Amino acid sequence: MSLSTKARAIVLAFGFMTAVPLAAQNAGIELLASPEYLRPDPFGGIVVADNVAPDKVVPERFAPDKVTPDKLAPDKVRASASSNLLHLEGARGGYVSFHLVVKMSQPGPYTLSLGFDRDQGKLQADLFREWFHFTESDKQYYPDALIPITLPYHSRLPEPDNRIAAQTAQAFWVDLWIPRDAEPVAYAAQAVLEAGGRRSSVSIELKVLPAVVPDEDVMLMDHNSYGTSWLAEDYPSISGKLGEGFFQSDVFFRLIHGYHRIFYEHRGIFHQLGYGHAGKVGPEFAPVLEGSGRARHVTEWNLYDRHYGPLFDGSAFAGTRRGAQPIPFVYLPVNPEWPASFLNWGEPGYETEFVNVLAEMERHFRDKGWTRTHFEVFFNHKKRYMGFSWDGDEVRFPADNRYFLEYGRLLKKALPPDTPVKFVFRADTSWDMEQQFKDLAGVVNMWVASRDILSWLPRAPAMLRQRGDVIWFYSGPPVVTQPASTITQFPIEGWMWGVGGFVHWLTVGAGSDPWFHFDGGGTALVYSGDRFGIAGPIPSVRLKIQRNAVQDLALLASFTRRKPLDELKREAARLYNRTAPADWWNPRPAFATEPTYNWSGMALNAATKLAMSHLEHIDPAAWARVRQYVMLLAAEEPKLK
Amino acid sequence: MKALLLTVMSLVPLGAAERDMTRELDEVARAATIMVDGDACQRIVTPRALDYMFKKDPRDPWVDGDNYDVNDQAFIAVKKTLIRLSHLASFPCDVNLWMPIAGHTDKIRVVIRNVNEMSQFWPWGKLYQDMIPQMKHVLETGRRITVAEKPGWVSVLAPVHDSLDATVALVEVVSQTRLDGHENVK
């Protein structure tokens, strides 16, 4: 399968870009472009997961009915006789992305460059080499990890470090960043491949619209992780040198901040849980405590402040395109063993230890001016891990809710009523969600809900928002063997539901050998840059696709100034997967009236099948169609002025 | 032969630091046999949880864990005793509770873990596991045994009796010569 045959038909169906006249295929070397949702393979084709039959991409009955198809294809192909011509359109404050593919029929060196024809203005281009991971599950190659490169880029095929003997194609991810203050005009650029004295190029035309992507997202994409021990394993070249000093070193904290930065730059946030299921707290996640009972108090903030200070005052994000901002949410180390010893649970000493230390923390945060971050009291433990006798995470047995009520009381006692520091009580909820929403009202005010069970509670998000609660939902990253566009389902689903955020439950666990024996990346959206000499994380294709969807969604939601939200949702749903907003919800199953501890996992799966069936097979063009709709609305913006 | 082998294992030469640690851990373990209430231990895990513990269903892969439940009064009472016992040592140590499973003599389960999240035997996340030979020895003989199989780790296993003087559980009193502040923070 070559990009210039079947895949080109798909590309045309996208209404997106690139056509390669045979004449331009320069005697064994070729530079091509493909849409972000069509991931190249190392042999000149498109990965099977993204390579569906053209008639499956945009069925006739799916053609938009309120706008004409030509209007809905602003990034359309204009195949000129002499060159590849890529037409892109983007709003300011956002990215436009695509793949460039270097194809060479014979092994050898090559050079890739990209330059703007005229004035580049404030536009910036970021290029990344795409690593082809060999996945164990299907014995295929998928591009995902993105290694930053500088231009001109000199290398050879087969790419030496990727070790694919028969490799004839190397893919590159291109991000074109359009700053908020970029001039809204048309820009032109050329990507050029040179090899063996021959040359092949792709012409890029980017029309920058006056519309600006809002800074605030309608869906806050959260990327979760646990502890920091994995950093020592993922960065052996650093931790090996520093030995036992690694976890107190500046480079260690820079690494942590690097993870926050990469997710922030991709319109997301990063969470690191700092304690275990039996209450062990990592040293950098909590101040040092001494004493017991009335004498228990904080003695040392050093590691905590080195870890969190730059995150709470925003300085960790200096120099980023989105600007220096404090992180909006963070886990506290609070658990049944911290700050109060569980030895005293139920006794006056427990209350005294808990209240005094929480009050100290509140004072410290207030003194430092850390008032823009939400500090989460959150219980992650499960009784199945034998640390404690109740489930803090995903309560199944309703009797456990009494512990939440008690901690709510303690928290209220610890905090001044007029504190400017934003403490929130977070619960990650599944089985007992419906009851918890009622029984813990006014106690828990941040909910991270199971996608499955929330799917039959359509009134819950609005009800929770109305009473001032935060409501997010959770799942995990799609593996690379699924279509590239699969990851876009989470932001759009959350927006359809009226939910404010989404948590990928684990995003830094790429497995023991992601490079040559990959597990698919179901727990990773970034990779360690260590093997490439980079002291920090590198992004993935999936993270880039997610970012672009989130920015498009932010722009789409901003059009509520002139279109009803329901209309925007209706059209987005129809374009995305031929559904109506109501299709994104499930009926409440009969068993939901039974005690939650009697529910079965099987029944749960069956109850959520209907809505999930619409998201099982996201076609490669799903988000491209939504994006086209967003661009169409964005293009209309100036007419209003 | 097995008893002899276990005795030999318990006498694996230890460094000076491990010897001091072992002496203290053994003192804690000895006290644990006296202090831990075996009847309360038997009330911790609910019959329902034990019933589900061995259920396997590929359509419901978490059916065992999802139905794990405990009687929190018994759990908390025993856990507090274990915490107090751990404070007898002059260094961080955990006292974990392990119990056999009726009808499954070849299996063993951890029932209570503690704040340092240390164990020489627990594969993280398991509801039950294959019987540890040294634990079987303790349950059968009622004698304490020291295990230092993993470098830098020392566990003393000691029996827990009920009111009928049957050995119904055991404690693992455990520490490490070099504590890892980051392990098991997850």
Image (cartoon, rainbow, N blue to C red):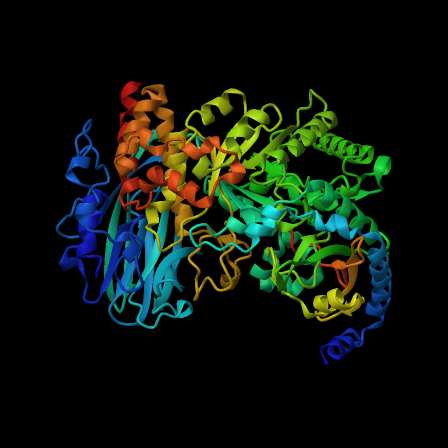
Name the quadrant of the N terminus of chain B: bottom right
Q: Is residue B42 visible?
A: yes
Given residues A464 and A54, the one toward you in this image is A464
Residue at the front extreme, as displayed: B164
On screen, residue B24 versus residue A568, left or right, reads right
Q: At which x and y percent is residue B164?
A: 79, 55
Please state which of residues A325 and A10 is positioned toward the viewer in this rendering. Answer: A10
Q: Based on the displayed image, in which of its 4 quarters is residue B170 positioned?
A: bottom right
Q: Is residue A256 left or right of residue A280?
A: left
As drawn, B145 above or below A528: below
Residue A24 pos. (x, y %): 17, 58
- Residue A373, picture quadrant: top right
Name the residue nearer the viewer: A526 or A382. A382
Q: Position of residue B130 (x, y in %)?
A: 61, 65
Number of numbered markers: 0
Provide residue A276's location: percent of width, then percent of height: 65, 49
| Residue pictured at 15% horizontal, 38% vertical | A60
Q: Is residue A321 visible?
A: no
> Which of the pair B79/A121 is nearer the observer?
B79
Identify which residue is drawn at 85% across, 42% down. A291
Q: Is residue A615 left or right of residue A531?
A: left
- A369, above or below B3, in the image: above
| Residue in the image at 44% along x and 34% along y | A591
